[in-house]
Image (cartoon, rainbow, N blue to C red):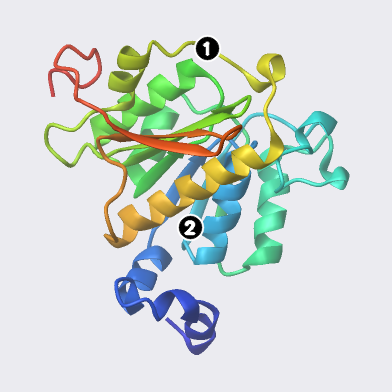
Amino acid sequence: MNDEQLQRYSRQIMLPEFDYQGQQSLLNSRVLIIGLGGLGSPVALYLASAGVGTLVLADDDVVDHSNLQRQIIHGEVDVGVSKVASAQQSIAALNSDVLVVALHLRLKGEVLAEEVQKADIVLDCCDNLTTRLAVNEACLRHQTPLVSGAAIRMEGQVTVVDPRQPNTPCYHCLMQLTGEQEQSCSTNGVMAPLVGIIGAIQAMEAIKVLSNLGQPLVGKLLLLEAKTMQWQTFGLPKDPHCPSCGTI
Protein backbone atom coordinates (compact mmCIF):
# COMPACT_ATOMS: atom_id res chain seq x y z
CA MET A 1 0.00 0.00 0.00
CA ASN A 2 1.49 3.35 -1.02
CA ASP A 3 1.28 6.71 0.79
CA GLU A 4 -1.54 7.96 -1.41
CA GLN A 5 -3.63 4.86 -0.63
CA LEU A 6 -2.88 5.19 3.08
CA GLN A 7 -4.27 8.72 2.99
CA ARG A 8 -7.23 7.84 0.77
CA TYR A 9 -8.41 4.96 2.96
CA SER A 10 -7.32 6.43 6.30
CA ARG A 11 -10.86 6.66 7.72
CA GLN A 12 -11.24 2.90 7.27
CA ILE A 13 -7.72 2.00 8.36
CA MET A 14 -8.16 3.84 11.66
CA LEU A 15 -10.96 1.44 12.62
CA PRO A 16 -9.20 -0.97 15.02
CA GLU A 17 -11.25 -3.97 13.90
CA PHE A 18 -10.37 -3.26 10.25
CA ASP A 19 -6.90 -1.68 10.34
CA TYR A 20 -4.18 -1.91 7.69
CA GLN A 21 -4.71 -5.64 7.14
CA GLY A 22 -8.38 -5.17 6.35
CA GLN A 23 -7.60 -2.54 3.75
CA GLN A 24 -4.90 -4.70 2.22
CA SER A 25 -7.43 -7.54 1.96
CA LEU A 26 -9.75 -5.30 -0.07
CA LEU A 27 -6.93 -4.14 -2.33
CA ASN A 28 -6.02 -7.77 -3.02
CA SER A 29 -9.62 -8.86 -3.70
CA ARG A 30 -11.40 -9.69 -6.94
CA VAL A 31 -15.16 -9.09 -6.72
CA LEU A 32 -17.76 -10.19 -9.26
CA ILE A 33 -20.87 -7.97 -9.51
CA ILE A 34 -23.71 -9.49 -11.54
CA GLY A 35 -26.13 -6.80 -12.69
CA LEU A 36 -25.37 -3.06 -12.94
CA GLY A 37 -28.87 -1.80 -12.30
CA GLY A 38 -30.48 -0.39 -9.16
CA LEU A 39 -28.59 -2.65 -6.75
CA GLY A 40 -25.38 -3.03 -8.72
CA SER A 41 -24.96 0.75 -9.00
CA PRO A 42 -24.39 1.51 -5.29
CA VAL A 43 -22.60 -1.82 -4.82
CA ALA A 44 -20.03 -0.96 -7.50
CA LEU A 45 -19.57 2.63 -6.36
CA TYR A 46 -19.12 1.79 -2.69
CA LEU A 47 -16.78 -1.12 -3.30
CA ALA A 48 -14.72 1.03 -5.66
CA SER A 49 -14.57 3.89 -3.17
CA ALA A 50 -13.67 1.48 -0.36
CA GLY A 51 -10.67 0.21 -2.34
CA VAL A 52 -11.49 -3.21 -3.75
CA GLY A 53 -8.63 -3.99 -6.13
CA THR A 54 -10.51 -5.64 -9.00
CA LEU A 55 -14.19 -5.32 -9.90
CA VAL A 56 -15.63 -7.63 -12.55
CA LEU A 57 -18.88 -6.16 -13.90
CA ALA A 58 -21.32 -8.39 -15.77
CA ASP A 59 -24.51 -7.17 -17.47
CA ASP A 60 -25.88 -7.64 -20.99
CA ASP A 61 -28.18 -4.60 -20.94
CA VAL A 62 -27.84 -0.99 -22.13
CA VAL A 63 -28.83 2.16 -20.25
CA ASP A 64 -32.41 3.30 -20.78
CA HIS A 65 -34.12 6.53 -19.69
CA SER A 66 -36.28 4.55 -17.25
CA ASN A 67 -33.12 3.33 -15.48
CA LEU A 68 -32.02 6.82 -14.42
CA GLN A 69 -34.61 7.05 -11.63
CA ARG A 70 -32.58 4.63 -9.47
CA GLN A 71 -29.46 3.36 -11.27
CA ILE A 72 -27.16 6.10 -9.99
CA ILE A 73 -23.95 4.89 -11.62
CA HIS A 74 -25.40 5.92 -15.02
CA GLY A 75 -26.20 9.40 -16.34
CA GLU A 76 -28.25 10.95 -19.15
CA VAL A 77 -25.26 10.88 -21.50
CA ASP A 78 -25.05 7.09 -21.03
CA VAL A 79 -28.47 6.29 -22.50
CA GLY A 80 -27.93 3.66 -25.20
CA VAL A 81 -24.49 2.72 -23.84
CA SER A 82 -23.86 -0.70 -22.32
CA LYS A 83 -24.31 -0.61 -18.56
CA VAL A 84 -20.90 -2.15 -17.91
CA ALA A 85 -19.17 0.48 -20.06
CA SER A 86 -21.09 3.28 -18.34
CA ALA A 87 -20.28 1.83 -14.90
CA GLN A 88 -16.62 1.42 -15.84
CA GLN A 89 -16.38 5.13 -16.69
CA SER A 90 -18.06 6.15 -13.42
CA ILE A 91 -15.73 3.94 -11.38
CA ALA A 92 -12.66 5.30 -13.19
CA ALA A 93 -13.74 8.85 -12.32
CA LEU A 94 -14.22 7.85 -8.68
CA ASN A 95 -11.13 5.69 -8.13
CA SER A 96 -8.69 5.17 -10.98
CA ASP A 97 -6.71 2.61 -8.96
CA VAL A 98 -9.50 0.04 -9.28
CA LEU A 99 -9.05 -2.47 -12.09
CA VAL A 100 -12.40 -2.91 -13.84
CA VAL A 101 -13.20 -5.89 -16.05
CA ALA A 102 -16.36 -5.15 -18.06
CA LEU A 103 -18.32 -8.13 -19.39
CA HIS A 104 -21.17 -7.07 -21.66
CA LEU A 105 -22.97 -10.39 -21.52
CA ARG A 106 -25.33 -12.47 -19.42
CA LEU A 107 -23.19 -14.86 -17.42
CA LYS A 108 -24.22 -18.48 -17.75
CA GLY A 109 -22.77 -21.96 -18.16
CA GLU A 110 -19.00 -22.33 -18.19
CA VAL A 111 -18.37 -18.58 -18.44
CA LEU A 112 -20.34 -18.05 -15.22
CA ALA A 113 -18.50 -20.92 -13.53
CA GLU A 114 -15.12 -19.54 -14.59
CA GLU A 115 -15.83 -16.02 -13.30
CA VAL A 116 -17.24 -17.30 -10.01
CA GLN A 117 -14.21 -19.52 -9.50
CA LYS A 118 -11.82 -16.57 -10.04
CA ALA A 119 -13.73 -14.26 -7.68
CA ASP A 120 -13.18 -13.88 -3.93
CA ILE A 121 -16.86 -13.01 -3.53
CA VAL A 122 -19.91 -12.62 -5.78
CA LEU A 123 -22.64 -10.00 -5.44
CA ASP A 124 -25.96 -10.99 -6.97
CA CYS A 125 -27.60 -7.74 -8.07
CA CYS A 126 -29.65 -9.17 -10.92
CA ASP A 127 -33.41 -9.13 -11.32
CA ASN A 128 -34.34 -12.60 -12.54
CA LEU A 129 -34.73 -15.86 -10.67
CA THR A 130 -33.10 -18.08 -13.28
CA THR A 131 -29.82 -16.18 -13.05
CA ARG A 132 -30.01 -16.03 -9.25
CA LEU A 133 -30.30 -19.81 -9.00
CA ALA A 134 -27.51 -20.37 -11.52
CA VAL A 135 -25.23 -17.99 -9.59
CA ASN A 136 -26.09 -19.77 -6.35
CA GLU A 137 -25.21 -23.15 -7.89
CA ALA A 138 -21.89 -21.85 -9.22
CA CYS A 139 -20.96 -20.33 -5.86
CA LEU A 140 -21.76 -23.59 -4.08
CA ARG A 141 -19.70 -25.60 -6.57
CA HIS A 142 -16.65 -23.36 -6.28
CA GLN A 143 -16.96 -22.50 -2.57
CA THR A 144 -17.26 -18.79 -3.34
CA PRO A 145 -19.15 -16.54 -0.89
CA LEU A 146 -22.28 -14.86 -2.25
CA VAL A 147 -24.13 -11.72 -1.18
CA SER A 148 -27.68 -11.71 -2.51
CA GLY A 149 -29.91 -8.65 -2.48
CA ALA A 150 -33.38 -7.89 -3.81
CA ALA A 151 -35.63 -4.84 -3.82
CA ILE A 152 -39.11 -4.25 -5.20
CA ARG A 153 -41.92 -1.81 -4.48
CA MET A 154 -40.99 -0.62 -0.94
CA GLU A 155 -39.44 -3.87 0.31
CA GLY A 156 -35.88 -5.14 0.31
CA GLN A 157 -33.83 -8.08 1.55
CA VAL A 158 -30.22 -9.19 1.92
CA THR A 159 -28.63 -12.52 2.82
CA VAL A 160 -25.11 -13.93 2.65
CA VAL A 161 -24.26 -17.45 1.49
CA ASP A 162 -20.86 -18.80 2.50
CA PRO A 163 -20.33 -22.37 1.24
CA ARG A 164 -17.04 -22.52 3.14
CA GLN A 165 -19.00 -22.72 6.39
CA PRO A 166 -20.57 -26.12 7.13
CA ASN A 167 -24.33 -26.58 7.52
CA THR A 168 -25.24 -23.10 6.32
CA PRO A 169 -28.14 -22.36 3.95
CA CYS A 170 -27.91 -21.22 0.33
CA TYR A 171 -30.10 -18.93 -1.76
CA HIS A 172 -32.16 -21.91 -2.96
CA CYS A 173 -32.97 -22.69 0.69
CA LEU A 174 -34.37 -19.16 0.99
CA MET A 175 -36.43 -19.57 -2.15
CA GLN A 176 -37.82 -22.89 -0.91
CA LEU A 177 -38.74 -21.30 2.43
CA THR A 178 -40.37 -18.13 1.13
CA GLY A 179 -41.78 -19.45 -2.13
CA GLU A 180 -40.17 -16.53 -3.94
CA GLN A 181 -41.48 -16.02 -7.45
CA GLU A 182 -40.29 -14.06 -10.47
CA GLN A 183 -41.01 -10.36 -10.00
CA SER A 184 -39.62 -7.29 -11.71
CA CYS A 185 -39.47 -3.56 -11.10
CA SER A 186 -40.86 -2.94 -14.58
CA THR A 187 -44.17 -4.55 -13.60
CA ASN A 188 -44.26 -3.88 -9.84
CA GLY A 189 -42.36 -0.60 -9.47
CA VAL A 190 -39.66 0.33 -6.95
CA MET A 191 -38.80 3.42 -4.93
CA ALA A 192 -35.44 4.94 -5.89
CA PRO A 193 -33.70 5.20 -2.48
CA LEU A 194 -34.68 1.64 -1.55
CA VAL A 195 -32.24 0.06 -4.00
CA GLY A 196 -29.54 2.40 -2.67
CA ILE A 197 -30.15 1.21 0.88
CA ILE A 198 -30.12 -2.48 -0.04
CA GLY A 199 -27.13 -2.10 -2.37
CA ALA A 200 -25.14 -0.29 0.34
CA ILE A 201 -25.86 -3.16 2.73
CA GLN A 202 -24.68 -5.66 0.12
CA ALA A 203 -21.43 -3.71 -0.25
CA MET A 204 -20.98 -3.63 3.54
CA GLU A 205 -21.54 -7.38 3.79
CA ALA A 206 -19.00 -8.00 1.03
CA ILE A 207 -16.41 -5.88 2.84
CA LYS A 208 -17.08 -7.79 6.05
CA VAL A 209 -16.56 -11.15 4.36
CA LEU A 210 -13.44 -10.06 2.48
CA SER A 211 -11.79 -8.54 5.55
CA ASN A 212 -13.09 -11.01 8.14
CA LEU A 213 -14.88 -8.16 9.90
CA GLY A 214 -17.80 -8.58 12.30
CA GLN A 215 -20.60 -11.05 11.67
CA PRO A 216 -21.90 -11.24 8.08
CA LEU A 217 -25.51 -12.22 7.41
CA VAL A 218 -24.68 -15.90 6.90
CA GLY A 219 -27.71 -18.00 7.82
CA LYS A 220 -29.79 -14.86 8.26
CA LEU A 221 -32.26 -12.87 6.19
CA LEU A 222 -32.43 -9.10 6.69
CA LEU A 223 -35.73 -7.53 5.61
CA LEU A 224 -36.69 -3.89 5.20
CA GLU A 225 -40.24 -2.56 4.94
CA ALA A 226 -39.51 1.00 3.85
CA LYS A 227 -43.05 2.34 4.26
CA THR A 228 -42.69 2.06 8.02
CA MET A 229 -38.86 1.80 8.03
CA GLN A 230 -39.13 -1.45 9.94
CA TRP A 231 -36.13 -3.81 9.90
CA GLN A 232 -36.37 -7.49 10.74
CA THR A 233 -33.71 -10.18 10.88
CA PHE A 234 -34.69 -13.83 10.69
CA GLY A 235 -32.66 -16.99 11.10
CA LEU A 236 -32.52 -18.87 7.80
CA PRO A 237 -32.32 -22.64 8.27
CA LYS A 238 -30.55 -24.95 5.87
CA ASP A 239 -33.07 -27.09 3.99
CA PRO A 240 -31.89 -30.72 4.15
CA HIS A 241 -33.89 -31.39 0.98
CA CYS A 242 -32.64 -28.34 -0.92
CA PRO A 243 -31.99 -29.24 -4.59
CA SER A 244 -28.82 -27.15 -4.53
CA CYS A 245 -27.10 -27.70 -1.18
CA GLY A 246 -29.11 -30.42 0.56
CA THR A 247 -26.61 -33.12 -0.33
CA ILE A 248 -23.48 -31.00 0.22
Left or right of 145 on screen, residue 75: right
Image point 53% across, 19% down: which residue?
A: 128
From the top left corner, tell me how far across and down residue 12 is, in percent. Answer: 44, 74
Q: Nearer the viewer, residue 168 or 85?
A: 168
Q: CA distance from mark 2 to mark 1?
A: 31 Å
Amino acid of disc 2: Thr
- Residue 71 visible in the current orientation: yes
> Residue visible at 47% across and 84% down?
6
Q: Is residue 160 left or right of residue 224?
A: left
| Tag in front: 2 or 1 | 1
Other residues around mark 2 within 10 Å, as few (<14) / some (14–19) / many (≥20): many
Reading the image, the residue beneath label 1 is 182
Q: Residues within 10 Å of mark 1 (few under 14, many from 20)?
A: few
Name the kind of residue labelled 1 in the image.
Glu
Residue 127 x, y percent position in the rendering:
56, 24
Label 2 SS? strand
Residue at 48% from the left image edge and 57% from the top image edge: 54
The spot of residue 141 in percent (x, y) is 25, 30
The disc placed on residue 43 is none
Q: x%, y% of residue 69?
A: 78, 37
Above or below: residue 92 compared with residue 196: below
Q: Which mark is residue 54?
A: 2
Q: Residue furthest bottom?
A: 3
| Left-right relation of 21 to 74 | left
- Identify the image quadrant of the N terminus: bottom left
Looking at marks 2 and 1 on the same chain, the residue that comes earlier in the sequence is marked by 2
Name which residue lies at 49% across and 66% down: 51
In what element is the residue under mark 1?
A: loop
User: Which residue of the protein is positioned furthest toward the right in this rendering?
Assistant: 77
Is residue 101 at all visible to an observer of this figure?
no
Q: Is residue 156 left or right of residue 65?
A: left
